[in-house]
Amino acid sequence: MPSAGYGPVKGGSDMVHVLIIEDDPLIAMNLQLLLEENGATSTMIVATQDEAIDAARLRRPAFITADVGLATGTGPAAVAAIHRAHGWIPVIFITVQPDAEDRLARTGEVFGKPVNERAIANAFKTKMAA
């Protein structure tokens, strides 16, 4: 079972559940607020690759945001494992070096840090409308 991360699961169980994979608590909480303001009905924040995989096993997310580099493991490895177990789930990767992460563009959109809130919100809304 994953640790509580930086925040508990919020909201109902039948809407847009978002898994936030981010090891920086301030960025994670900022993403949580941003996504909730733009339609996420529940969120789970986790900080490691293993916590992400466990959280998705407990509750399949409808959307994922993933930091590329984590203190333990990587966001891309967590997303790949989640996709294998649960099928395709839309994802946004967030990294300090977005230009160096071309390989991730096949799986999801790649955004840089600091986080561009408008771009993240637009990508989230577009992917959830599809």
Image: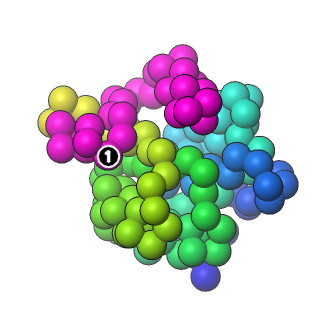
Residue drawn at 18 percent across, 44 percent down: 103
Q: Relative to 123, is 87 above or below? A: below
Q: Is residue 8 above or below residue 28?
A: below
Q: Is residue 32 shown in magenta? A: no
Which quadrant would the C terminus be assigned to in this image?
top right
Residue 111 is one of the magenta-drawn residues: yes
**Residue 81 drawn above or below residue 19:** below
> Helix or strand or loop: what does disc 1 sit on?
loop
Which residue lies most toward the top here?
118
Between 25 and 15, the one lying in front of the other is 15
Q: Is residue 72 above or below residue 15?
A: below
| Count of numbered badges drawn on the protein | 1
Where residue 24 appears, as percent x and y from the top left, is: 48, 49
Residue under the image location 36 percent in, 34 percent down: 109
Q: Which residues are magenta?
A: 101-130
What kind of secondary structure does the magenta stretch mostly adopt? Answer: helix
Give the residue at mark 1: 107
- Quadrant of res 50: bottom left
Residue farthest along the bottom direction in this orientation: 1
Type of amino acid at the residue the image marks with label 1: Thr
Q: Is residue 35 left or right of residue 114?
A: right
Side (left or right) of 80 relative to 32: left
Residue 49, position as x, y percentages in the image: 40, 67
Quarter assignment of residue 36: top right
| Dot 1 crowding, Cα within 10 Å, few <14, some 14–19, many 20+ | some
